[in-house]
Image (cartoon, rainbow, N blue to C red):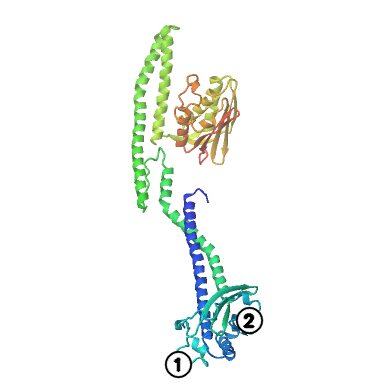
Amino acid sequence: MKLNSFRFKIGLLNLLLSGGVLLIFGLFFMSVISRIGYERIDRELRVLADLQARRPFPQSGRLDYFEESLRNLHGKDAKKQFVIKVTSPLGAPMYFSSCWPSVLADHKLPALEPAGNTDVPYEEHLLPLRLPLLLDGYLPRHGPLLRMHIRGPVFSTITIDRGRWRVVGIGNEDENIFIAMNLAVFDAEVQRFRYAFFIAMPLALLFLLCGGWLIANRALGPVKIIAGTARNITAKGLDRRIPKTDADKEFAGLIDVINGMLDGLEKNFQQAVRFSADAAHELKTPLTILQGQLERALNEAAPGSEVQQRNGELLEEVQRLVAITRKLLLLAHADSGRMRLALAPFEFSSALESISEDVGIMAPGLILEREIVPRLHVMADADLMNQVLHNLITNAIKYNRKEGWIRCVLQKEENTLRFTIANSGEEIPQADADKVFDRFYRVNKSRDREIDGVGLGLSLAREIVLAHKGELVLDSSRNGITTFILRLPLCSQPVV
């Protein structure tokens, strides 16, 4: 997964936003659950404490019966969950449960106001439905509860070694009542919820990440189509267009713009190709006539005269123009996909042997090294393939150094012919390595007139090779050695 991928960024952004919202909501929900739990516990403790604070009965039997009622409601673990302690308004112990934790020291209990300062009326809506069970046996069945001077309630949470307790303190004129509830069960429930949340959180984030990735992948589907179509658009395939399919409105507009641009490019390119082909074709006839006239004038001029010398120079320039015109015509046909190939079995090995022998004539000062596997055949147009070999050989000669060398290696690689031609000489700069096949491009501009050619040989050779379903590449140019590699598919059947 690439970090600079737009799809990855969309998925990550979705993860951060949704994950952040989910985390904030989860933390808020846990705080709400905790607050509601405390409110429920406080409400229950207040009801229990308020009932005891308003009883006018002696405390001994009343409180014993109260604890017995709690055991009936909560089972045998009630002693571990609820405990009660009663003191006088001055703090003297009057009653406490047998399982009252000794670590709950008096100074940790909620502090009540002095007696006689507060009068809190009884609130009937605080009584839960189970109160008749608690009060059955000693609560008057008719008439309201007595109005008494009540202090509190006051709540506090006390943390000790064995857990946490929620304590309510309430008092009347005669006593202070403290009821504590063990928060172990409540804390366990909250902890289970936290565990569930933190277990579900990574799964939810993974789901969000996958969801964001799928959404981004689906949203970028038209971009893939655009990129795939654009990748296949070449000079020979300008008629390709991007299909609209079911793209969204924004992408549909972009596709229309790109298709419109391609329409204009195809039209302009076809006009340029047609102009090049027509111009090259129209120049052939006058150049041929001019060449013939100059050859006749050259033959009629006195040997060694100034006229003969001038006509010879003009003839060389005309022949150069004829060669350029012929190459431009071939390139125009290649651009338009109308290069005619007279395919037939072509013995590449013997053609290379024949052309390489001319190196001694064209450049007698160069050393030629040959390693040619015999009888390698390809399906090719003989004239065009000979022109490719001629262009590669002459290119190696022109850009060689004095007393340099040329190495030709022809070998077979499975079903492919591989021809490697290397020569000593000036290196091609790395910045120019991708431009050597451009038309009219020459590496050393200062030597344009010293070296014959106009920069069309390699470009034409590659177009011919591509038309034969092969490839021609610059392999390397370093340490004073420049190497080109030509690959062509071999004949599927041996040639007899």
Residue shown at the point (38%, 13%) measured from the top left = 296
Q: Are marks 1 and 2 in contact (CB under 8 Å)?
A: no
Q: Quadrant of residue 175?
A: bottom right
Which comes before the other along the chain, label 1 or label 2? 2
Q: Amino acid at mark 1?
A: His
Residue 378 horizontal/vertical position (percent): 50, 36
| Residue 19 position (above or below residue 357) | below
Report, in whole angstroms, how far the alpha carbon at label 1 lies from the one at label 2: 34 Å
- Of residues 482 and 51, which is closer to you in this image? 51
Nearer-the-camera pick, 247 or 367: 247
- Of residues 241 and 403, the one nearer the viewer is 241
Q: Secondary structure at mark 1?
A: loop
Residue carrying label 2: 100
Frontmost residue, 493 versus 334: 334
Residue 441 visible to the viewer: yes
Mark 1 residue crowding within 10 angstroms, few (<14) / some (14–19) / many (20+): few
**Residue 265 shown left or right of residue 401 in the figure:** left
Q: Is residue 104 visible?
A: no
Q: Is residue 90 left or right of residue 325?
A: right
Q: Disc 2 on helix, strand or loop?
A: loop
Up-down: is 11 above or below 268?
below
Residue type at numbered disc 2: Trp
Residue 250, percent across and down?
36, 50
Place of residue 265 in the rendered image (x, y in percent of width and height, measured from the top left): 36, 38
Q: How many numbered dots are placed on residues in this image?
A: 2
Which circle marks residue 142 in the picture? 1
Residue 155 image offset from top left, x and y in percent:
54, 75
Q: Is residue 238 left or right of residue 368?
A: left
